[in-house]
Image (tube, grey):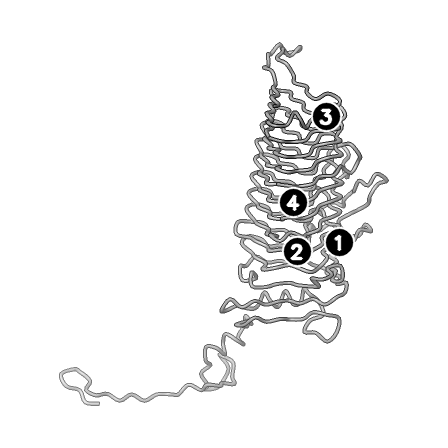
Amino acid sequence: MDVQNGTAVSPTLKGGVEISAPSDRPGAAGTAIPNTFWVDRYYSPKTWFITTNTTWTVCRSGCAYKNPLDAWNAALNADFLNGAILTISIGDGIYNLDNQFFTNVTKTEHVHIVGDTAAPDKVVLNFTKTKGNNLGGFAAYNGGKIGLINGMTIQAPTDGTGALASTDRYGRHVWNSQSYGAGIAAYGAGSNIVVGSRVVIHGLYYSMVADNNGGIDAPQGGVAMSLAGDVNAMARGGGVIVCTPCSATDASDYTHPDITLGSNYDAERGGSLYIDGSTGSKSLITGVVGLTGGHIWAHHVTLTGSLIPASGQGAWITGNSSAEFTGCNISGYNIGVNATNGGYASVDTCNIHRNIQGGIVADGGRVTGASAIITDNTTYGIQALHQGSVVMFGTYAGMRANGTNFSAQPAGVEHRSGSAYTASSIDVQ
């Protein structure tokens, strides 16, 4: 090369040529230069790219995997490009699983876990380690996502070796300690699980839980939840569950008889439920409960009685929670709709009938509505106490065969403390 005044003029540089198909691992003896794709594909930590829609099969023999968890764990090591979806297709059979499907990464939103959508009872995921481990079925934590769960039964053993310890002669469930997992759980901000319309959940302490701003989305409904402890479907701590419509039955925890639990649907600590058209039955405490600022949208729900006949509450809305029950049908409880301690319930066009203490009770809460039918309630059609308030329009004509249509507590003085309280009110037109 010529140099004039410190400047290279027309330099020609020659060097090595990269080999496109190297055979040696980086750091090994040899002169080959590994290309970037080779490093990404083979160098630890091992991963691979899924660039088009792909299906991995799971079955007893002849498939890519025999165990659904093995397929799931492999999916956790994949990366997804171009919006590609990986479907883990599970063949008919009972699969005994010793762990849960867990994710805390967003990329698993590209993974669909699908069994038999025509017959979800033919693909059974039996989670055998739910006793004493607080494990469940599917769990997305701290921003983790699952793209779809559909076509399967999610269950735990009910012979005492799972979360459930036993059931007494009244149908009340006793649960093993530290066995409080959920069939499907989304915990933490950004965590989200999509659930298809052909899913059965049975025998776990919670059927579904969305907690601490997590979300569970079943917009096509069809999720059938049964045999739970505290709650079938619970949205807590800003969590959101959409299940329109779903079914929930047989929820009770009688492990400690002085602290009993059991609700079909629960929104608490700012959680939200959207459960239009859903059904609930056989709850020990309540069909639908809103606690401490929970929010419930429950048009056309049907709640058909407690686990112990004529006990419990169809809807219990308390602690500044709110619920809208337009078009509901509630029967077979001690109280049909109970708004307490600042709770608010709207009951437009509801049919509230065949309850014991009252069809509607406002015990320090407020109930409003229009065109409701309130019939055949043994003691009261509507009761208000502890400054409770009920305002109903177009409803009086639909009140019949109640023990007494109305009971409102008047103003008075508390006989021990001498404190005065104002009257409760009922305005029915």
Q: Quadrant of the C terminus?
A: top right
Q: Upstream in the sequence, badge 3 or badge 2?
A: 2
Mark 3 vs 4: CB contact within 8 A:
no
Label 1 crowd bin: few (<14), some (14–19), many (20+), radius 10 Å: many
- Along the line of sight, the residue nearer the viewer: 257 or 248: 248
Q: Which residue type does callout 2 highlight?
A: Ser
Q: Position of residue 10 (x, y in %)?
A: 21, 88
Q: CA distance from mark 1 to mark 3?
A: 46 Å
**311 or 66, nearer to the observer:** 311
Quadrant assignment for the N terminus: bottom left
Frontmost of labels 1 and 3 is: 3
Cα distance between the residues tagged 2 and 4? 14 Å
Position above or below: 83 against 154 = below
Which tag, 1 or 3, sits closer to the chain's start? 1
Residue type (three-letter) at the residue carrying disc 4: Gly
Q: Earlier in the sequence, mark 3 or mark 4?
A: 4
Residue highlighted by disc 2: 197
Q: Please give the residue where the numbered disc 3 appears in the rendered image.
A: 400
The mark lying in front, picked from 4 and 1, is 4
Question: Relative to 1, is 349 above or below?
Answer: above
**Residue 99 found in image quarter:** bottom right
Residue matched to label 1: 156
| Residue at screen point 73% across, 32% down | 353
The disc labelled 1 sits on which kind of residue? Answer: Ala
